[in-house]
C-alpha cells in the first residue's frame, strides 16, 4: 500500500515538473517573439501602438495645456477625443508609432488663445497680448488723468482666433480722453482727502498663502458682480508677490456687499490696498475688501450677510476700478474662488 502511494506521489511530482517546464518554455517563447504593447484607439478607431503609454499621454497632456510651445499666446488646446489604451502582445518586429498618433491628435485639436481686451463701459475697444501690457494701459491712462479712467476695465479673453493686437503705448493714445476742468478738480480732490480714510482696528496683510481648500464652516456670497481680471496666486508687475486674493472689475461706485455676517475689525486706508475693510467671521475666518472709493462702516460695527459696506474704487496700488477680495483663515490667504 505504501509503495503504491509513493509511486503515485512520484508520478504526480513528475507531471507537475513537466507542466512547470512547459509553462516556462511557453512564456519564454512568447517573451522572445512578442513584447507587451498598448493598442491606441481614438474615438473607437485603432490608430497605432505605443510601448510607453505614460510617456505618450504626458506629451498629449502638455500639448493640451500649452500647445506646441511656439506661440506664447496659446492658452490651451481642446481635444474632442482623448486616446484609449488597451494592453496587448505585439510581435517584436512591428514598430510602434507614437509620433503619428500625436500628429493625428494635433490635427483634430482646437487651439484657444489668451489675450486681453481693454473695455470702456464694458464695451471692448482694443486688445493687447498679455495682462502686464493691459495693466500698463490702465496705469498710463491713470497717470495722464484721462477723464474716462473710472470706466476702463480689463477683460481676459479666450478665443480660437486672436483679434488685432496693439502695443500698450498705442492703446493709451487711442483711449486717452482729455480731462475737463471739473474732472481734473475731482481727481485732485480724490488724490488728497476724500479717498483716504483714517484707519481704525487692526489687519494682517502678510503674504502667506495656501493652495489648499480650508473648511470655513460658513457660506460666503460674492461681494460684487463683475469680470475677474486677476486670480488668486497670479503674478503681476504691480505687486511684489503672488496675488493673495481675487480682483473683480466693475464700475466705480458699485456697491460692495458683505460676503458673510460678522464684525468689522479694520476700516481705513492700508498702503497698496487703498481704502479697505476687513470683516471677521466665526472660526477665524476673515474677508478683505480692497481699493474701495468709499467705506460705509467703521471698526466694531456688526455686519449682516449682503449688507452694503463700501463702494468699488481704484485707490491704493490699482490700475482701474475693481474690488480686491480676500478670504483668510487665521491669517493665511486662501483662493476665494473655492468659496464664492
Image (cartoon, helix red, strand yellow):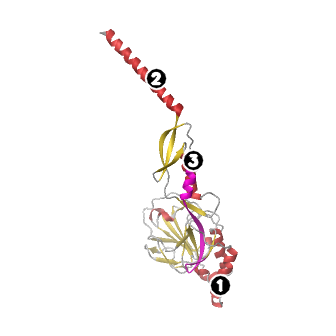
300 magenta-colored:
no
Which of disc 3 and disc 2 is earlier in sequence? 2
Q: Position of residue 323 (x, y in %)?
A: 54, 73
Residue pointed to by mark 1: 177
| Residue nearest the viewer, comparing 303 with 162 | 162
Report the mark closest to the observer, 3 or 1.
3
Q: How dense is the environment of label 1, judged by Cα within 10 Å: few (below 14), some, or many (20 and up)?
A: some
Task: Please report the bounds of the magenta region as a residue range.
Answer: 97-125
Q: Secondary structure at mark 3?
A: helix
Task: Write down the quadrant of residue 302 in the picture.
Answer: bottom left
Examine the rendering and report whether any part of residue 273 can be seen: no
Mark with earlier residue (2, 1): 2
Toward which corner of the image does residue 164 lie, by quadrant?
bottom right
Mark 2 closeness class: few <14, some 14–19, many ≥20 residues within 10 Å: few
From what the image shows, is residue 264 above or below residue 234? below
Q: How many numbered marks appear? A: 3
**How far across and how far down the image is residue 339, in percent?**
46, 64
Residue beneath disc 3: 98
Above or below 16: residue 129: below
Residue at screen point 50% across, 47% down? 40
The residue singled out by tag 2 in the image is: 21
In this picture, is 120 found above or below 44?
below
Amino acid at each position: 500500500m505504501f509503495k503504491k502511494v509513493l509511486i503515485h506521489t512520484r508520478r504526480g511530482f513528475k507531471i507537475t515538473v513537466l507542466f512547470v517546464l512547459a509553462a516556462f518554455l511557453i512564456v519564454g517563447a512568447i517573451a522572445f517573439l512578442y513584447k507587451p504593447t498598448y493598442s491606441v484607439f481614438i474615438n473607437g478607431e485603432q490608430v497605432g501602438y505605443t510601448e510607453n503609454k505614460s510617456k505618450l499621454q504626458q506629451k498629449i497632456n502638455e500639448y493640451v495645456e500649452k500647445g506646441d510651445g511656439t506661440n506664447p499666446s496659446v492658452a490651451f488646446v481642446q481635444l474632442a477625443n482623448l486616446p484609449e489604451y488597451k494592453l496587448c502582445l505585439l510581435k517584436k518586429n512591428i514598430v510602434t508609432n507614437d509620433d503619428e498618433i500625436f500628429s493625428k491628435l494635433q490635427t483634430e485639436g482646437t487651439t484657444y488663445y489668451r489675450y486681453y481686451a481693454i473695455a470702456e463701459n464694458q464695451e471692448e475697444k482694443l486688445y493687447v497680448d498679455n495682462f502686464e501690457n493691459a495693466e500698463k494701459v490702465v496705469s498710463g491712462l491713470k497717470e495722464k488723468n484721462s477723464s474716462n479712467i473710472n470706466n476702463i476695465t480689463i477683460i481676459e479673453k479666450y478665443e480660437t482666433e486672436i483679434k488685432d493686437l496693439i502695443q500698450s503705448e498705442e492703446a493709451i493714445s487711442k483711449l486717452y480722453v482729455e480731462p475737463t476742468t471739473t474732472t481734473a478738480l475731482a481727481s485732485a480732490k480724490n488724490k488728497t482727502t476724500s479717498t483716504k480714510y483714517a484707519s481704525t482696528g487692526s489687519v494682517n496683510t502678510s503674504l502667506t498663502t495656501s493652495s489648499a481648500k480650508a473648511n470655513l464652516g460658513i457660506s460666503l456670497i460674492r461681494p460684487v458682480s463683475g469680470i475677474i481680471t486677476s486670480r488668486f496666486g497670479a503674478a503681476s508687475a504691480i505687486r511684489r508677490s503672488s496675488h493673495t486674493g481675487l480682483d473683480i472689475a466693475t464700475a466705480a461706485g458699485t456697491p460692495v456687499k458683505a460676503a458673510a455676517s460678522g464684525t468689522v475689525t479694520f476700516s481705513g486706508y492700508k498702503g497698496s490696498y487703498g481704502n479697505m475693510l476687513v470683516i471677521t467671521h466665526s472660526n477665524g475666518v476673515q474677508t478683505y475688501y480692497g481699493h474701495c472709493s468709499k467705506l460705509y462702516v467703521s471698526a466694531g460695527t456688526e455686519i449682516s450677510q449682503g449688507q452694503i459696506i463700501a463702494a468699488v474704487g481704484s485707490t491704493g496700488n490699482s490700475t482701474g476700478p475693481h474690488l480686491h477680495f480676500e478670504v483668510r483663515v487665521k491669517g493665511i490667504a486662501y483662493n476665494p474662488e473655492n468659496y464664492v
